[in-house]
Image (cartoon, rainbow, N blue to C red):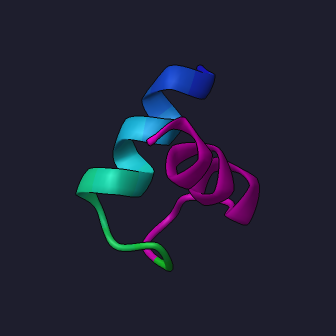
Amino acid sequence: MRRIAMEKGKNSAPSEHVPDYSISSGINAE
């Protein structure tokens, strides 16, 4: 589920429905 959240954090808006931990993971993953 982390992968999905990470991709959603990148593709969808940050304040859409993705927790900040997912957004942070997406940024760090890049």
Q: Residue at x 61, y 46 (%)?
A: 28
Quarter of the image where the C terminus is located = top left
Give the residue furthest to the bottom.
Answer: 15
- The front one of 18 and 25 is 25
Q: Which residues are magenta?
A: 16-30
Q: Position of residue 6 (x, y in %)?
A: 49, 39
Residue 3 x/y as whole percent: 50, 23
Q: Quadrant of residue 2?
A: top right
**As displayed, is residue 18 above or below residue 3?**
below
The N terminus sits in image quarter? top right
* Main SS, magenta residues: helix
Residue 7 in the image, given as x and y percentages of width and height: 36, 38
Which residue appears farthest toward the right when viewing the image?
21
| Image spot of residue 4 (x, y percent) | 45, 28
Residue 19 left/right relative to 7? right
Q: Quadrant of residue 23?
A: bottom right
Residue 3 part of the magenta-drawn span: no
Residue at (37% x, 46% y) in the render: 8
Asked if residue 19 lies in the magenta stretch, the reply is yes
Residue appearing at x 64%, y 44% in the figure: 25
How many labels were placed on the picture? 0
